[in-house]
Image: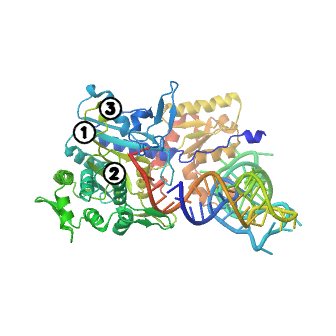
Amino acid sequence: MAKDLKPKARLPRGLADRTGAELAATHSMLAKIRAVYALYGFEALETPAFEYTDALGKFLPDQDRPNEGVFSFQDDDEQWLSLRYDLTAPLARYVAEHFDALPKPYRSHRAGYVFRNEKPGPGRFRQFMQCDADTVGAPSVSADAEICMMAADTLEAVGVPRGDYVIRVNNRKVLDGVLEAIGLAGEENAGRRLTVLRAIDKYDKFGVEGVRLLLGAGRKDESGDFTKGAGLNERQSAVVLAMLTGDGVTADADGVKVEIPGDVELAAALATNAAFLEGMDELNTIRMLVAAAGYEDRVKIDPSVVRGLEYYTGPVYEAELTFEIKDEDGRPVRFGSVAGGGRYDGLVARFKGEKVPATGFSIGVSRLLSALAFLGKMDDEAEVGPVVILVMDKEPARLADYMKMVSELRANGIRAEMYQGGGGMKAQMKYADKRGAPAVVIQGSNEKAAGELQIKDLVEGAKIAASIADNAEYRAARPAQFAVKENELVAAIRDVLERRAAPTLGLDD
RNA sequence: GCAGGUGUAGCUCAGUUGGUUAGAGCGCCGGUCUGUGGAACCGGAGGUCGGUGGUUCGAGCCCACCCACCUGUACCA
């Protein structure tokens, strides 16, 4: 019976524990990201992990199931609260709440965990970290261009080489114009518009033919599962594909040209569509600004970028890693989008009534970190463990001696601890090894009587040990171990640490 | 959510046409070795064979349902 009551030690699915090296790498990467954001003039802001549900809720994907995808609970006073699922909605709340006191434009950056109650997968968690930067109160596309260029700088700052990434930019107005031109305007076509946008979003993944199928009747995947398409006819699909591939839609200093073979009528409809032209014009401006700053090889216009379906109102952007890497099983790993964002002119207006133009983007910290790990750019150097003082003798007076040694090392800035477990010497050595200790200090009764300490360099010792086959010899040799006077403890440990820091004795060889 | 696949020790996996006490390697703990992390040898712990129900004299193996994970797909603020 008691057995049944024992809780099972297990992590809820979609969550992850993070330890030493990974945490250090995360902190190091965040520091680099923040440095770039700060350099661009963004100031730090932190908002809490949860908000009133209605502050987040309007922009949930499916209005019929407002709790879908979000972790929610009720407060004492029965008001509903939800864990944030991104950092943009809380920013909008913050700006609306403190609007009068904030400088406009308000430029802020923030990092934090967000939560999504949906199916986890490889690299997809229910809690993950984002790091955002936003400009609120900036109507011009120069703010969008700046964000894109900052995204490029940020990726390079964390170690993604130029050429291994691209910031792709599109404009929601261009897509809206295309949809209008092919006759999908109006409330009654909202569902089909979404389907078309989703199909466009799949261009990277499935190519022209895949998108053509999704725009038309539908597409069958490898497992035989069928995805229903948007049901466009061939003429409509041709316009979407012309825009998507750039074959037929061109824009330069002379203006926008649309040519669709055999369909002058729809070509003209698109070429005179107001939203389409405005969107193309904005993209041209972004292109010009980006080129003037010398970013044209890194920030590129790409008509297949769609992003979230709900709140973006203008330019949208996505940072994609372009290098290919194979995993342990030899399968190619696609990192895809590691950051994204766009203009959301309506988000603050939810609280304020008046329109507040804003644009920003968000880095998926965990995803970027795992990509960096594949690139070999992660700061994952093993932490140097503490110097371990072995407990050779458990009498209180001797324990006091050991504690004193620990204090002395700590007072000199050296990580150190006395072994606090119950094991014998062999267990203590194993402990020190597992902790990555650079050295252990040994003082049994013999050394005590002589006023000495034995210090063992564990890194050097492991190397010497590798060449000794016989255990008796190994033990007799006491590799990399030496005696010093009690008052030489700090100096001797410093020597060991310095040797370890030297390249010939590092972990690399 | 949908489709397909996989579930045996901490990890990677064997396990015959259904047959008695479910194995290996690695890892872990201990000993050889009265004061030394490695190596070697020896020993030990660790499994309700994902769960429940069924078929059978007998189920890790067959059947049904459920759960979890993997792959694809859908959704992705």
Residue A469 in view: no
For the residue pair B31 and A354, the one nearer the viewer reads as A354
Q: Residue furthest left?
A: A254
Residue A474 in view: yes
Residue at the disc numbered 2: A188
State which quarter of the image contains the N terminus of chain A.
top right
For the residue pair A343 and A194, the one nearer the viewer reads as A194
Residue at the disc numbered 1: A357
Would residue A53 be found to the left or right of residue A32 on screen? Answer: right
Which amino acid type is shown beneath numbered disc 1?
Pro
Q: CA distance from mark 1 to mark 3?
A: 13 Å
Circle 2 residues within 10 Å: few <14, some 14–19, many ≥20: few
Which amino acid type is shown beneath numbered disc 3?
Phe
Helix, strand or loop under label 1: loop
Which amino acid type is shown beneath numbered disc 2?
Glu
Residue A173's label in the rendered image is none
